[in-house]
Amino acid sequence: MGQKRAAVYCRISDDRSGKEAGVQRQREDCLALVAREGWSLVHDGPTDTFTDNDVSAFSGKKRPAYRRLVEAVTAGEVDYIVTWHNDRLHRRPVELEALIALVERTKVKVATVKAGEFDLSTRQGITMARLGVTIANDASMATRERVQRAMRERAEQGKVHGALRTYGYAGRRNDDGTHTIEVVPEEAAVIREAARRVMAGEALLSVVKDFNARGISSLRGGQWSRSTLRGVLVSARVAGWREHTEGRTNGAHGSLWRGGEFVAKAEWKGILTRQQVEQLRRALTDPARARKASGRTYLLSGGLVVCGMCGTPLRGRPTRNGLRDYTCTAPPVGRGCGSVSIKQDALDTYVRDLVRAAIADGRVAERLRAGSGDADEAVALVSSLETDLAALAEDHGAGRITRPEWMAAREPLTARLDAARRDLARRDGAESLALVSGGLDAWDRRWHEAGRSGLVDRQRAMLRAVMASVAVGPAVRGRNRFDPDRVSEPDWRA
Ligand SMILES: [Zn+2]
């Protein structure tokens, strides 16, 4: 075999102790190792190493370069991953497990500057690695606890000053008895992040869970809840305004507080703009948003799309740019490997079209029918009633019959259709058959009817009638458009 190909991975974490090797030193040591071994170097686009900067492997934040590295390995472009120490590659157990799976699948080898070859292809090597990551994880947990304790102490100090301390602001008593209220930068950053995500359509609860998972404390050092975070985001205070809430005598307000009246510009600086706070108030009191937040708008939720790497159902979630993704979510939020993500709208359309193709070629209905016995007659009845109703609507639409005529003719048909559907539902497997009967035209009609009425559940049932799930693999480097090669053949039911 020819020259081995190596990819260098460097990661520098947010290192206040200054004890870790700088990314420059990691890089030089790794490149020296590659040169010594006579390997060729796999580049990460324009750069010679895959480098993630200033992100802690423990926090669960994304590591874009690492993802690209995994993609390159998966694509068979890499024989050796070279890194300064194996803790650069993973710190959390789930990341190690994903790496073990990657090694098993691709036979890639891991070489480290500090500890030589890191052998994940044998049982002993894997056991040692698991032990190592457990210890590293304990160390990170201890760090996090220390940080939380410090934040709690600071919050308690703030509490002594009563109303002078609110989330995002700390007050100082001056010698002349006046107060100066200043922005607390790290809390302001948390408020801005929450505002940005909520305005992009993310559910408040999802932001709350993420903050708690990341160890970001609320004012009193405790966990965030929806009402505490909402209380911050809808307050005029964070826009630098004094506010007044009817009947409110002290700092406490109920869980459904929608923010007070903007009374006057305050002497403290705004963290958000007034416009943003008003937008947040609208967003957080919008009933449509509550439905959206429940996840029902994700067609392929509930296990219809799974991760091709780890088999976990992908979760729908809004992205920063206002679009939506299906994503394999790593702990602590999810249970997946975190290595797969795909655009929602493109995947929804693609999977729907796969199912349409299966319906069009007729085999799906045939096989479902073979398994469902005597439901045929009931299915045919439902199908013909649906066709009649559609024809009637068309006549009305084209002006061939009046609206009263249409209504009068529709009523008995609808009643018969409901009865026929109930009859079908009593038969085993017949509901599925009903959803695919009548060929592609009937299927499309049902699909659009459900779409117009916002019945995503109904559309999901139409997919579920014929398929269990599709699997989505990781993105291939350099392909930014929707890539059908990543999507497996559906696991057909029939
Ligand atoms: Zn996964």
Image: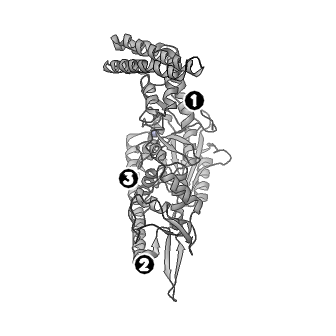
Question: Who is closer to the viewer here, 475 or 115?
Answer: 475
Q: Distance between the residues labelled 1 and 3?
A: 38 Å
* Marks 2 and 3 in Cβ contact (< 8 Å): no
Q: Does residue 198 lie above or below 359 as drawn?
A: below
Sequence-wise, the earlier of marks 1 and 3 is 3
Q: Quadrant of residue 125?
A: top left
Amino acid tagged 3: Thr
Q: Distance between the residues labelled 2 and 3?
A: 41 Å
Badge 1 element: helix
**The C terminus: image quadrant:** top left
The residue to which callout 1 is attached is: 484
Report the mark closest to the observer, 2 or 1. 2
Q: Residue 84, how many percent across, how many down? A: 53, 53
Q: In which quarter of the image is residue 399?
A: top right
Q: Is mark 2 within 8 Å of ligand 1?
A: no
Residue that protrudes farthest toward the right in the picture: 46
The residue to which callout 2 is attached is: 161
Q: Can residue 440 be seen in this view?
A: no
Sequence-wise, the earlier of marks 2 and 1 is 2
Q: Does residue 244 lie above or below 475 as drawn?
A: below
Q: Does residue 231 lie above or below 286 as drawn?
A: below
Q: How far apart are marks 2 and 1 (CA)?
A: 59 Å
The residue to which callout 3 is attached is: 134
Report the mark closest to the observer, 2 or 3. 2
